Image (tube, rainbow, N blue to C red):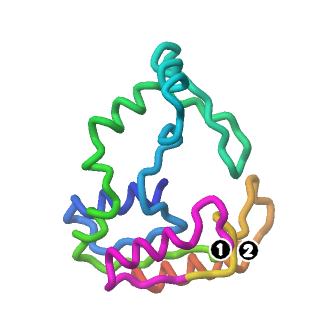
């Protein structure tokens, strides 16, 4: 959700003069949005639920405080609104084969900020990288995104 956070911050911080996002979400989507009432009640009582990261398969702890914070800050977490209010140059970089955050997210961001530029590469969510990265050079897709970002920021 780093790109979404960057959009939210850029919309309220006048020190930011340009914005580049990489594989950004277009909404602060919550994993609990489709949870049944029984699961929500259990979450409130236990204080923690675990959510499986679809890309890494890690069991991520979600503390109930996260839900309360989200409810108290829904308006401040509105990426659509933030994107529409940006008055700075924006570059949206996205992989066309991204299954974690589909390319449609980039198109939504563009629809809310028509002046934004979109840069796509035939790549996944991490532009061909993996952890740990042991190679001397970046994958071609990541290299293209880095170069496009640098050119935009110059």
Q: Nearer the viewer, residue 5 or 114?
A: 114
The label shown at residue 78 is none
Pointer 1: what residue?
142
Pointer 2: what residue?
139
Q: Nearer the viewer, residue 94 or 36?
A: 36
Q: What distance separates the C-alpha of mark 1 from that of mark 2?
A: 5 Å
Q: Nearer the viewer, residue 98 or 5?
A: 98
Using the rendered view, name the quadrant where residue 79 is placed. Answer: bottom left
Pick out the residue farthest to the top: 45
Q: Looking at the image, which residue is at 27% across and 67% down? A: 16
Dot 2, how many residues are within 10 Å of its Cα: few (below 14), some (14-19), or many (20+)? some
In the visual, does 52 lie left or right of 152?
A: right
- In the figure, 58 relative to 4: above or below? above
> Which percent across, then down, holds residue 77?
32, 50
- Read off the magenta span: 97-119
Query: Tag 1, which secondary structure?
Result: helix
In the visual, does 119 lie left or right of 91?
A: right
> Which percent across, then down, holds residue 127?
66, 70
> Which percent across, then down, holds residue 34?
52, 41
Quadrant showing the C terminus: bottom left
């Amino acid at each position: 959700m780093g790109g979404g956070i960057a959009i939210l911050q850029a919309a309220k911080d006048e020190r930011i003069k340009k914005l580049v996002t990489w594989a950004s979400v277009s909404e602060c989507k919550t994993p609990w949005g489709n949870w049944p009432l029984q699961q929500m009640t259990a979450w409130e009582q236990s204080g923690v639920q675990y959510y499986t990261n679809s890309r890494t398969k890690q069991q991520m702890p979600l503390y109930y405080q996260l839900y309360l914070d989200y409810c108290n800050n829904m308006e401040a977490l509105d990426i659509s609104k933030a994107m529409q209010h940006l008055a700075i140059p924006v570059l949206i970089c996205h992989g066309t084969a991204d299954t974690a955050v589909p390319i449609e997210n980039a198109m939504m961001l563009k629809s809310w900020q028509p002046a934004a530029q979109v840069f796509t590469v035939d790549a996944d969510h991490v532009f061909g990288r993996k952890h740990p990265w042991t190679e001397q050079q970046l994958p071609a897709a990541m290299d293209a995104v880095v170069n496009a970002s640098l050119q935009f920021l110059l």
